[in-house]
Amino acid sequence: MTGTDSTGRMLSGRCECRAVRYRVPDAFLYVGNCHCSNCRAGTGSAFKPFAGIERDKLQVVEGADTLLVWGDEKDNHTVVRGGGYVHIATGSLADEPSIRPTEHIFVGSKAPWFEITDELPQSEEH
């Protein structure tokens, strides 16, 4: 793992079954709410809040051998932009990040029963 943000603040997180634990600096580059059908199915919710950060800043501290990767190693639902970045489901964070969501993406395929009620920008796709 490389350095932390300018304050040195690290965030911890885990998966639902607690087999995987991770640490990441509070230095996310973007945060959004994804409404695509894959994110909805994966979370069992109307959307998935996610945060993007450089891949080398994510430190898996427990359970790396049990990670489930959906897709290929360099470009999948978590590892994006040709393998250089990762998306962290913000609901898996135990600590509060300093950044907040700035947009809704894939609203063209959002759950028809869910109404977006905030003023954040909305994109039909990415």
Image (cartoon, rainbow, N blue to C red):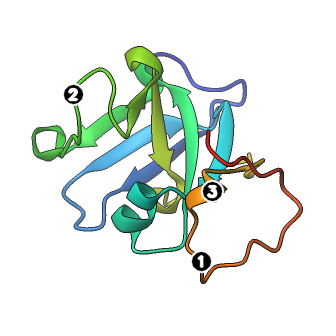
Mark-to-mark CA distance, 2 and 3: 26 Å
Residue 21 left/right relative to 9: left
> Which of pointers 2 and 3 indicates the residue nearer the eye?
3
Q: Which residue is labeled 1 in the image?
A: 112
Question: Which numbered disc covers residue 17?
Answer: none
Instruction: Please tell me whether mark 1 sits on a helix, a strand or a loop.
Output: loop
Residue 43 pos. (x, y %):
40, 67
Residue 93 pos. (x, y %):
49, 56
- Going 54% across and 55% down the picture, which residue do you hit? 90
Q: Which residue is labeled 3 in the image?
A: 108
Q: Nearer the viewer, residue 11 or 67?
A: 67
Q: Which residue is labeled 2 in the image?
A: 72
- Residue 75 seen in render: yes
> Which of pointers 2 and 1 indicates the residue nearer the eye?
1
For badge 3, the amino acid type reads Gly
Instruction: Please tell me whether mark 2 sits on a helix, a strand or a loop.
Output: loop
Considering the image in quadrants, where does the C terminus appear? Answer: top right
Above or below, 62 relative to 57: below
Above or below, 123 relative to 79: below
Mark-to-mark CA distance, 1 and 3: 10 Å
For badge 1, the amino acid type reads Pro
For badge 2, the amino acid type reads Asp
Q: Nearer the viewer, residue 60 or 84?
A: 84
Residue 65 left/right relative to 52: left
